[in-house]
Amino acid sequence: SNLETQEVQSNEKNTIKEDTLLVTGISCGSCSHSIKTNLKKLDGFISCDINIETGKTICTYDSSKLTISTIKSEIDKAGFTVTSTSK
């Protein structure tokens, strides 16, 4: 039935997660740009919104392809430190 099909589709959407990270070391637009450039290479990454003043970084990603720890290590590789995560 149609109802079952809709349920399956909504379950797939539930793999999209949004996590907030606190990143230290972001001081300018080019800092946030380099983080975004690194993250865009990851399969399953959708977007991130970085507040340059606070370091608050909201990442949206497909959790069936990508984990938050992979995102964190990619930010580390870019030369920044993730100080906290919140669900």
Image (tube, rainbow, N blue to C red):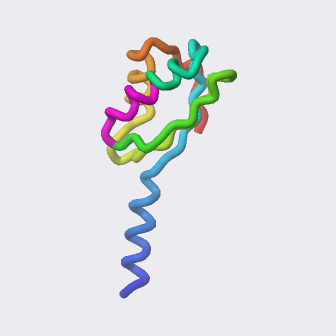
Residue at x 63%, y 23% (from the top left corner):
52
Quarter-wise, where is residue 44 in the image? top left
| Image coordinates for residue 80, horizontal then vertical, percent | 49, 14
Q: In the image, is 50 to the left or to the right of 64?
A: right
Residue at 52% over, 15% down: 81
Q: Is residue 42 above or below residue 74?
A: below
Q: Residue at x 39, y 40 (%)?
A: 45
Outermost residue on the bottom side: it is: 1
Q: Is residue 38 magenta?
A: yes
Residue segment shown in magenta? 35-43
Q: Where is the C terminus found, in terms of image quarters? A: top right
Relative to 13, does residue 49 appear above or below in the rendering?
Answer: above
What residue lies at 51% left-to-right and 19% top-to-bottom? 30
| Percent position of residue 40, x then y | 37, 34
Q: Of residues 5 and 46, which is closer to you in this image?
A: 46
The answer to if 48 sits in the magenta stretch is no
